[in-house]
Image (cartoon, grey):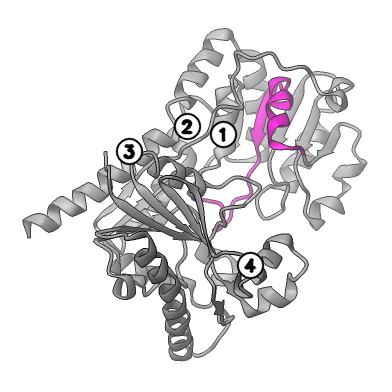
Amino acid sequence: MITNRDIIITGLQPWELELGSNCVNIAQEFAKNNRVLYVNYPLNRLTAIREKNNPSIKRRIQVLNGEIEDLEKINDNLWVLTPKCMQESISQLKPNCFFDLMNKINNRRFAKQIQKSIKKLAFNNFILFNDNDIYRSFYLKELLKPSIYAFYLRDNMVSVKYWRLHGDRIQSQLMHNVDVVVANSTMLRDIGLKQNPHSYYVGQGCDFELYDDTKTFEIPKDLSAISSPIIGYIGAIWSLRLDINWIRYIAKQKSEWNIVLIGPEDENFAKSDLHNMKNIHFLGKKIQTELASYLKHFDVAINPQILSPETIGNYPRKIDEYLAMGKPVVVRKTNAMEVFSDFCYLADSKEEFLLEIEKAISENSKEKAESRKIFALNHTWKNSVEEIYNAIQKVENLNKNL
């Protein structure tokens, strides 16, 4: 346990993110025993132009114009800083030396804003915790001089187009330079180990308050007309994440099954022939507090994840939510999902995925449901953050002995 310390968090997820955020949950857990400054990512010029009507961007511009305070107190231990600076849009700049020069300029602007809050809040001997922000936080170790710099690797971001030009090079250098790397999947931990021997798997946390299976959940109206067995998915319905072909195959092979998909769709799903299939039901985006009511009435919960560099190392939080409600869960087999192998059904192909759903339906029991719940409920933010603390303290103890 780390207590009575100052912790600064930078990352890719803004404090106000509607879909929920690993980093916000970690910040809230840190703040139970430490003072925490959560730093929103700074605005860049292209985003300011392209998304000028986005309420979040409008608020950033108000901060830049001095209309809103940049430092907001959330509680006695937690503050959120929205940096009062504009960043240059550099992700596609060439050559590398020009990118590095402009990135250092951006880092200096960013660091200057953080330093103002450090002084105002009288932070000292602080830990810097970076959630996947490989560009804007690259030089913060030398600019802010934290006692420990921890890098949180939770997604294989460098495979995404935005980071493809410079991401792998910059992330590798960053992981080499930081004091400790913590990852929420074993595969991402192994990526960290290639650059830094102080790389640790810290698991994943989940907030189970809304997924309490002891509560009574009435069946939602738009689900009540759909007959069992209901094979359900909750989350972003994006072709970057989900395999349209697998969903189509299951629906065609099992016309007596009803596949329910809940969440926002991307263009590929919205235009797909899945909408013409009678046993596939797109119920749209729901508010967070409604989701457990839908999940409660699924017969099987699924994650037909597409296999790609972007997804292969992911630890989907939805799996813990499914299991916390006692549901049988069928997922695409990946290295990250191996930790669930005793409690989920893992499949390598669409044919195997269908067979595993059949098995999940036929084998389900109260005993299996209880074992799933017990397993999932160990994956709390408290437990994950304790693993982060352990990793940081190992490095601090090594440094003391040098």
Q: Is residue 317 visible?
A: yes
Magenta-drawn segment: 286-314
Give the foreground label among 3 and 2: 3
Is 343 situated above or below 141?
A: above
The residue closer to the viewer here, 376 or 249, is 376
| SS class, disc 2 | helix
What type is the residue that disc 4 sits on? Arg
In the rendered image, which residue does mark 4 sit on? Answer: 60
The alpha-carbon separation of the residues under discs 1 and 4 comes to 34 Å
The alpha-carbon separation of the residues under discs 2 and 4 comes to 40 Å
In the rendered image, which residue does mark 1 sit on? Answer: 319
What type is the residue that disc 3 sits on? Glu
Q: Quadrant of the N terminus?
A: top left
Marks 2 and 1 close (CB-CB < 8 Å) = yes
Q: Could you say where residue 164 lies in the image, as x and y percent from the top left?
A: 54, 72
Residue at position x 62%, y 65% in the image = 68
In the rendered image, which residue does mark 2 sit on? Answer: 340
Q: Please tell me which of labels 2 and 4 falls first in the chain.
A: 4
Marks 3 and 4 close (CB-CB < 8 Å) = no
In the rendered image, which residue does mark 3 sit on? Answer: 386
Give the foreground label among 1 and 3: 3
| SS class, disc 3 | helix
Q: Please tell me which of labels 3 and 4 falls first in the chain.
A: 4
